[in-house]
Amino acid sequence: MRSVSNTTRIALYLYGLLILLVLYLPLVSVGFASVSKARYLSFPVNRYTSEWMVQAVTSPNVHALVLTSLKIAVLVTLLSMLLGFFGALAFARFQWKYRPLFQKLILLPIFFPQTVLGLALLIWFSALGVQPSWKTAVIAHLVWIAPITTLIIAIRAYGFDPALEEAARDMGASTLTILREVTLPLLMPGVISAGLFAFLLSWGNFPLSLFTSGLDSTLPKWLYARMVSGYTPQIPALGVLSVAGSAALMLIGIGLVRWMRRRA
């Protein structure tokens, strides 16, 4: 294998730093806006304050918004993990007549624009006489997120040896025992990873929530509405707290997945 020269290595490092700068510089500006005393951000920041952070943490309205978003995200995560687990087995592990068709159909919702998907679901709910609420938002999120979790778990399902299940079956284990004692532990790192993706995708989802949550406002909907009218620095403060919480969740999830892989 040809070694990389020092010049090429430095160029790759600089390119990587440039990509990180482009990705995270907007978050830095949001961070400055959240601690600026002025109503609108200007550089350099003349006066700093934690007032907006305190308001974001103590506001009852924000608590209600976070609770609604959490209910949606947690339910979507749990249901996506369940559907994704069994969907991944059908996608990657077992041979059956309509498997190629299933593999194609499971990919379709991922490629739909979320605004179009949200509008279609809203029309469908209206035709059925269902009043949009946070519960219909859960269904809408599942339509788009469950296929993603299925693919994530399917990657893990492709990676383990089916002979392990056959060996357990030869030793007299039932199908349920094999599923509980062999298949599920081996796929669990993929299930946890899929759950993390599902939570973060649902937590920050704006287009589907906009069309399908009705009068139940979620955090992304509220942030957008306040950006359009009634802006205060509390908005970027809440955004910074949301990003920090998501990052903490990701770090915990990565540690959990690594621990489970070592255990497996």
Image (spheres, helix red, strand yellow):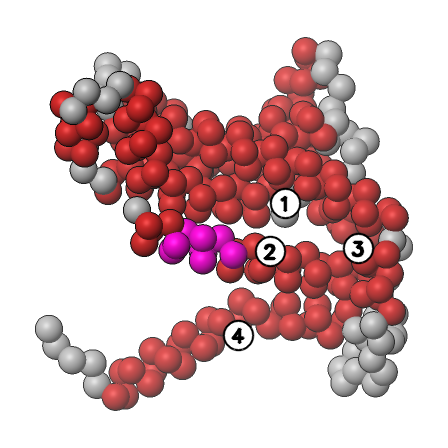
| Magenta stretch bounds | 252-259
Q: Residues within 10 Å of mark 1 (few under 14, many from 20)?
A: many
- Which of the two marks, 4 or 2, is nearer to us in this view? 2
- Residue at label 1? 203
Q: Residues within 10 Å of mark 3 (few under 14, many from 20)?
A: few
Tell me if residue 144 comes above or below residue 203 in the rendering. Answer: above
Q: Residues within 10 Å of mark 4 (few under 14, many from 20)?
A: few
Q: Left of 129 or right of it: where is 177? A: left
Earlier sequence position, callout 4 versus callout 1: 4
Give the residue type that dot 2 points to.
Ser
Tell me if residue 29 comes above or below residue 102 in the rendering. Answer: below
Q: Are marks 1 and 2 in contact (CB under 8 Å)?
A: yes
Give the residue type that dot 1 points to.
Trp
Q: Left of 245 or right of it: where is 91? A: left
Percent across and percent down for residue 143 are: 53, 28
Q: Residues within 10 Å of mark 2 (few under 14, many from 20)?
A: some
- Residue at label 4? 21
Earlier sequence position, callout 3 versus callout 4: 4
- Residue at label 2? 246
Give the residue type that dot 4 points to.
Leu
Q: Report, in whole angstroms, how far the alpha carbon at label 3 lies from the one at label 2.
A: 21 Å
Q: Quadrant of the N terminus?
A: bottom left
Q: Are marks 1 and 3 in contact (CB under 8 Å)?
A: no
Is 24 within the magenta?
A: no
Q: Residue at x 27, y 83 (%)?
A: 8
Give the residue type that dot 3 points to.
Met
Question: What SS does tag 4 mark?
Answer: helix
